[in-house]
Each structure stands twice: as C-alpha cells, then as structure tokens.
Image (cartoon, grey):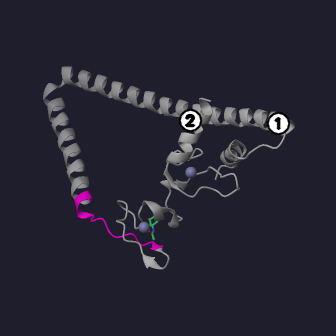
Amino acid sequence: MSLMGNLFFSSLLAPSRSDDDDTESRSSRVTQLCTYFQQKYKHLCRLERAESRQKKCRHTFRKALLQAASREPECTGQLIQELQSAACRRTSISQTKLREVEPAACSGTVKGEQCTNKALPFTRHCFQHILLNRSQQLFSSCTAKFADGQQCSVPVFDITHQTPLCEEHAKKMQFFLYM
Ligand SMILES: *[C@@H]1O[C@H](CO)[C@@H](O)[C@H](O)[C@H]1NC(C)=O
Ligand SMILES: [Zn+2]
Ligand SMILES: [Zn+2]
C-alpha cells in the first residue's frame, strides 16, 4: 500500500547526511505533505458531497410526505405507521443476529501456540492477528517505515485506505506538523 506514505515517513524518520540532502529532503517532504493533504482534502470533499446528497433526499422525502398528508391524511398516516414498523423489524432482526454471534477465539498462533485473545466481531482473528486474513478489508497495515527501512506492521482500522497510520505513527505525524 501507499508508496507515498512510505516515502514520506522514511524521509521523515531517516537521519539526513549533509546540507544538500537536507534541502532536497525538505523540499521532497513538503511536496509529499502537499500530496497527502490534497488526497485528504479530496476525500473530505467526497464525504461532504455524499452528506449533502443525503440531506437533499431526506428533504425531498419530508416534502413529499407533507404534501401527501395534506391531500390524503388517512393513507399517509397508514404509510408512516408501516414505514415505522418496517424500520423496527429491521433493527430488531439485526439486534438478535448480533446477540447470536458469540465472540470466538482468535485462530491466529503465537510461536506455534494458539492465540488466546477473543476474535473481533464477525471475524476469526483478534486485533493483533487480523491482518493474517488477506481477504478482509477493514484493517490495513500501518504505512509508516522505520529508519532502518522496516515497515511498521501494526493493524489500523481505516476504511478510507488513505495512508493509514497506527496510533504511535499518527502521533509522530502530528508532532512533525506542529514543529
Ligand atoms: C476473512 O475475511 C473475510 C471478509 O471479512 C471473511 O469472509 C472470511 O471468512 C475471513 N476468513 C477467515 C479465515 O477468517
Ligand atoms: Zn490473535
Ligand atoms: Zn505504525
């Protein structure tokens, strides 16, 4: 995942050798930071557009309901009741489903021994081992790299998949931004 994130953090964490390197790495850091924020900005714009689309939908729906209520109050009342009970049925079904699922043990192993942690809901792995499942898409590996070139392997819950960072590396990033 994210070459950009790796480059960014290796340049951030690796010690620089000379002044020439410094200027160069500074400008590349700035460029990478710009790209990073551009991506974040685009993502936020997308979220906002989705939100306003939803708002419009709700608004249109309320208006239609109001119109219907003034023309056919009886039928509209019935419709609202039906919608409400349908919504209730949906939530009660999902709640019983949720209750039925007992947290199983993690199927991962630590040095040959079965992991004793409880699995995350709807998975067969605990937080430490969730990345063992290659087909899951909710967690990704932290994209930061250490100075020795090793990538951090802490799982991060980041469904946006935009240069995910573990808590520690997110803190480092914050520190870097406010230096
Ligand atoms: C891996 O994750 C996918 C998607 O969440 C799931 O359907 C599948 O059962 C998981 N496999 C294992 C072995 O946990
Ligand atoms: Zn485990
Ligand atoms: Zn990390």
Name the residue nearer the viewer: 51 or 26: 26
Q: Residue furthest right?
A: 20
Q: Residue at x 78, y 38 (%)?
A: 25
Element at badge 2? helix
Q: Residue at x 37, y 67 (%)?
A: 117
Residue 39 magenta: no
The chief SS type of the magenta part is loop
Residue 99 magenta: yes
Q: Specify the segment rendered in magenta.
A: 98-109
Q: Amino acid at mark 2?
A: Gln
Dot placed on the residue nearer the N-terminal end, 1 or 2: 1
Element at badge 1? helix
| Image coords of residue 109 (percent x, y) | 46, 74
| Image coords of residue 7 (percent x, y) | 71, 46
Q: Is residue 52 above or below residue 16?
A: above
**Circle 1 is placed at which residue position?**
24
Q: Is residue 47 above or below residue 111?
A: above
Q: Residue at x 76, y 34 (%)?
A: 26
Q: Residue furthest bottom?
A: 112
**Circle 2 is placed at which residue position?**
174
